[in-house]
């Protein structure tokens, strides 16, 4: 926890959640780092602390990185050092702000992943980005599927297969109730959740990107 001295005692700069947890446990003391910083520096430190929270979605992190860059004049290298992320992660996250507002919404809700976004960003046309994002959401496309679509290799390879599948099975359309349930589960576990349901049976898929996220689920 980081605090700064004030006329009335100390003000928390970063680590408020730790302080609240210590209160709930009945602790009367908690280790803290005391820093003599001004108001602007306090905001910067609090913003960096906020970025390091695990429950932030990629768009929230992108916005926070952008604030550090524009409002506090930090270089990308300085941001990397402060938040403890590698350069490529920070750069990729900042690029999310280049997406259209509709696509950013999909990212915020966890409907499309960072892996999907890498391919979407290669489409300079915002309308095409939006159309492909909608297809990812409705058809539950994998990252590899999107890579093939963007490269133009998937349409030809899948044309015959899709024609046959269309004749054999109807296209799966998710009901509003299923979509709402996916959203509720995503918010609960903090990652993308996909539900496939047909005639009272189906499966629920929960995605995770690393071991820490898996253990938190």
Image (cartoon, helix red, strand yellow):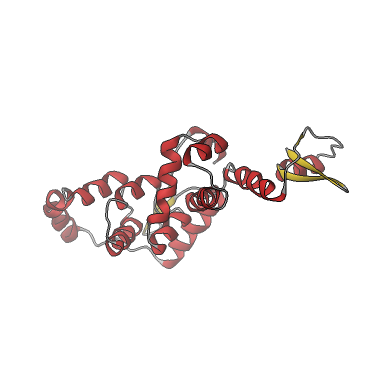
Q: Quadrant of the N terminus?
A: top right
Taking depth in this image into account, of 198 and 153 the one nearest to the observer is 153
Residue 119 horizontal side relative to residue 54, left or right: left
Displayed quadrant of residue 28: top right
Q: Which residue lies at the image location 62% right of the left edge and 47% below the top edge?
A: 47
49 in relation to 98, above or below: above
150 in relation to 34, above or below: below
Displayed quadrant of residue 201: bottom left
Taking depth in this image into account, of 75 and 215 the one nearest to the observer is 75
Residue 42 visible: yes
Extreme residue toward the bottom, this view: 176
194 in relation to 83, above or below: below
Q: Quadrant of the C terminus?
A: top right
144 in relation to 169, above or below: above
Taking depth in this image into account, of 201 and 15 the one nearest to the observer is 15
Q: Which residue lies at the image location 71% right of the left edge and 50% below the top edge?
A: 39
Displayed quadrant of residue 215: top right
Taking depth in this image into account, of 156 and 20 the one nearest to the observer is 20
Residue 203 visible: no
Residue 29, position in %: x, y?
84, 35
Q: How many numbered tags mark residues here?
A: 0
Residue 207, position in %: x, y?
43, 44
Q: Which residue lies at the image location 57% right of the left edge and 47% below the top edge?
A: 55
Q: Which residue lies at the image location 48% right of the left edge and 47% below the top edge?
A: 191
Residue 37, position in %: x, y?
73, 43
């Amino acid at each position: 926890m980081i605090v700064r001295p004030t006329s009335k005692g100390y003000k928390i700069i970063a680590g408020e959640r730790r302080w609240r947890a210590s209160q709930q446990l009945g602790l009367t003391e908690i280790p803290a780092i005391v820093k003599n910083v001004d108001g602007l520096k306090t905001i910067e430190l609090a913003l960096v602390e906020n970025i390091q929270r695990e429950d932030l979605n990629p768009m929230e992190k992108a916005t926070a990185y952008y604030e550090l860059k524009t409002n506090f004049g930090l270089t990308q290298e300085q941001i990397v050092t402060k938040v403890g992320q590698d350069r490529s992660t920070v750069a990729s996250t900042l690029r999310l702000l280049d997406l259209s507002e509709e696509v950013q919404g999909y990212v915020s809700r966890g409907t499309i992943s960072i892996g999907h976004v890498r391919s979407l960003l290669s489409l300079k046309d915002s309308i095409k980005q939006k159309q492909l994002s909608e297809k990812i959401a409705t058809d539950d496309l994998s990252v590899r599927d999107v890579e093939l679509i963007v490269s133009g290799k998937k349409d030809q390879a899948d044309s015959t297969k899709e024609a046959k599948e269309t004749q054999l099975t109807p296209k799966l359309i998710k009901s509003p109730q299923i979509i709402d349930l996916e959203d509720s589960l995503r918010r609960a576990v903090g990652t993308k959740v996909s539900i496939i349901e047909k005639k009272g049976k189906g499966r629920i898929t929960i995605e995770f990107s690393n071991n820490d996220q898996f253990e938190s689920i």
